């Protein structure tokens, strides 16, 4: 029963979509297991870009059943708009399936998300204000409304009335905002939204297990990344779910014995969006940092925000290898480093004069840490047309060998451009 997990190993934006798309060729099903439409990924196919937020990457293949699992929070309006965008580009979305147990993001979640972030001021978390956190919070406090509730208008309305009684108190009394009208929301979501969602809704746990028991290949696709994980990330600057490999089990309803391959996606450097500690960060105005942002097009797919750039952090990656039980790494955007005279890698942290080769567990240590870097010569060669490991200049091969040695996990694939076919299969040393 072969199952593969693809997981981000840094702070997101590693290029998971590209390699998920690559692995999907051999799959029968691609399952998104957590997050919401705060996670954007862009695929480039035959020169055309597809910016996806909720629909799993495998939708671009006719033989794939794309599945949104129970661990995802779904804004149905956004999902249907994405389906319309794909349909307009000639992509068949009729195979899409959505878990009835997935929780809905509704307008009051987005309103509360934006207001909470605004009132935090300088202590804001840097959320995308898409309602992700408030929806997961409602799920945890057992007042959430699920996708399956759209199938029963009576239940949907009863739940909406109950939750709005509390939400409207918060909006009007705490934030001095207008309340949401039950009738208006019910009319919107029990009308066209419901009618269009119904064909996609199913028991995705049963669907996934039927595929596994039939010996079909299933790919589990995470959003965000390891260090945005609610438990293992740089809390509180994290997301509200579990983007680690373990999250695939709860977010899709499978046990760990079904998983036989865990691929960690990492960028050849590192970026972060929003607030939080970043040991190897290159400040805005640093020529190398600006180069990484400009050449790597490091702006959020959803938000357009400039990403914070920095050198590759092997300390973080060692922790990602542990937390996810990575079997291999797929490295993206090696070509972004093509023009640099030198490339640096953070191999350890200095915390008050003490060397740390593993990630400090205490947040105060992490905030005080400074990088201990080793510098390697750059290759000053355009890698974008290369297809074989032997094509790479020796300096690029040395960089990959060095990373592999530092993180103690094989690097099996290397991205050398944004296109679907711009990658190199590599035999780890």
Image (spheres, helix red, strand yellow):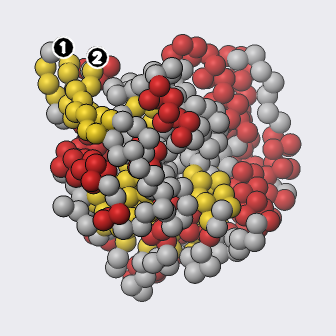
Q: Quadrant of the C terminus?
A: bottom left
Q: Residue at x 63, y 55 (%)?
A: 52
Depth order, front residue of 310/179 = 310
Residue 59 position in % (x across, y down): 61, 69
Of 217 and 48, nearer the camera is 48
* Left-right relation of 63 to 415: right
User: Could you say which quadrant of the image residue 391 lies in?
Assistant: bottom left
Q: Is residue 231 left or right of residue 298?
A: left
Upstream in sequence: badge 1 or badge 2: 1
Give the residue displayed 50% in from the left and 21% down from the top: 284
The answer to whether residue 253 is seen in the rendering is no
Q: What kind of element bears circle 2?
A: helix
Task: Decide: is 254 above or below 117.
Answer: below
Q: Is residue 6 above or below residue 138?
A: below
Residue drawn 45% across the image and 69% down it: 23
**Label of residue 368 in the image:** 2
Identify the image quadrant of the N terminus. Answer: bottom left
Q: Is residue 151 left or right of residue 100?
A: right
x, y (%) of residue 298? Answer: 55, 38
Q: Is residue 418 left or right of residue 3?
A: right
The residue lying furthest to the front in this view is 380
Label 2 neighbourhood size at 10 Å, few (<14), some (14-19), many (20+)?
few
Depth check: give the residue in front, 347 or 238.
Answer: 347
Q: Which residue is the extreme one toward the bottom?
A: 214
Discs 1, 2 touching: Cβ within 8 Å: yes
> How many numbered badges does the structure rendering display?
2
User: x, y (%) of residue 354?
Assistant: 13, 20
Dot 1 falls on a residue whose secondary structure is loop
Q: Is residue 173 above or below residue 19?
A: above
Question: Mark number for residue 352?
Answer: 1
* 70 over 26 or under it: above or below: above
């Amino acid at each position: 029963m072969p199952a593969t997990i693809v997981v981000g190993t840094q702070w997101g934006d590693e290029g998971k979509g590209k390699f998920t798309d690559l692995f999907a060729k051999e799959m029968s099903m691609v399952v998104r297991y957590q997050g919401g439409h705060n996670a954007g990924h862009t695929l480039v196919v035959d020169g055309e870009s597809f910016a996806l937020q909720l629909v799993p990457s495998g939708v671009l293949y006719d033989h794939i059943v794309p599945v949104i699992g129970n661990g995802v929070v779904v804004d149905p309006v956004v999902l249907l708009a994405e389906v319309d965008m794909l349909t307009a580009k000639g992509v068949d979305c009729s195979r899409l399936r959505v878990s009835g147990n997935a929780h809905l993001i509704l307008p009051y979640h987005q309103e509360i998300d934006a207001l909470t972030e605004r009132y935090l001021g300088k202590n804001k978390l840097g959320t995308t204000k898409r309602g992700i956190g408030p929806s997961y919070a409602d799920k945890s406090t057992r007042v959430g409304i699920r996708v399956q509730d759209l199938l029963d208008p009576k239940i949907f309305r009863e739940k909406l009335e109950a939750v709005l009684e509390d939400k409207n108190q918060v909006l009007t009394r705490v934030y001095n905002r207008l309340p949401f009208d039950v009738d208006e929301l019910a009319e919107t979501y029990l009308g066209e939204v419901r009618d269009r969602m119904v064909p996609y809704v199913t028991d995705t746990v049963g669907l996934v297990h039927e595929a596994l028991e039939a010996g079909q290949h299933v790919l589990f696709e995470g959003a965000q990344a390891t260090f945005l994980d609610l438990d293992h990330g740089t809390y509180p600057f994290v997301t509200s779910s579990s983007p680690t490999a373990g999250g695939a089990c709860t977010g899709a309803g499978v046990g760990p014995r079904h998983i036989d391959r865990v691929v960690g996606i990492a960028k050849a450097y590192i970026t972060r969006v929003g607030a939080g500690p970043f040991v190897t960060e290159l400040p805005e105005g640093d020529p190398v940092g600006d180069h990484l942002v400009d050449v790597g097009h490091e702006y959020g797919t959803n938000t357009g925000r400039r990403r914070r750039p920095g050198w590759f952090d092997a300390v973080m990656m060692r922790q990602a290898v542990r937390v996810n039980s990575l079997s291999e790494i797929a490295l993206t955007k090696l070509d972004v480093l093509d023009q640099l005279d030198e490339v640096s890698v953070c191999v350890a942290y200095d915390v008050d004069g003490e060397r740390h080769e593993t990630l400090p567990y205490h947040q105060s240590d992490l905030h005080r840490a400074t990088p201990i870097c080793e510098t390697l010569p750059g290759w000053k060669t355009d890698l974008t047309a290369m297809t074989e490991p032997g094509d790479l200049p020796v300096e690029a091969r040395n960089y990959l060998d060095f990373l592999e040695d530092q993180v103690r996990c094989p690097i099996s694939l290397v991205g050398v451009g944004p296109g679907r076919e711009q990658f190199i299969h590599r035999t780890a040393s």
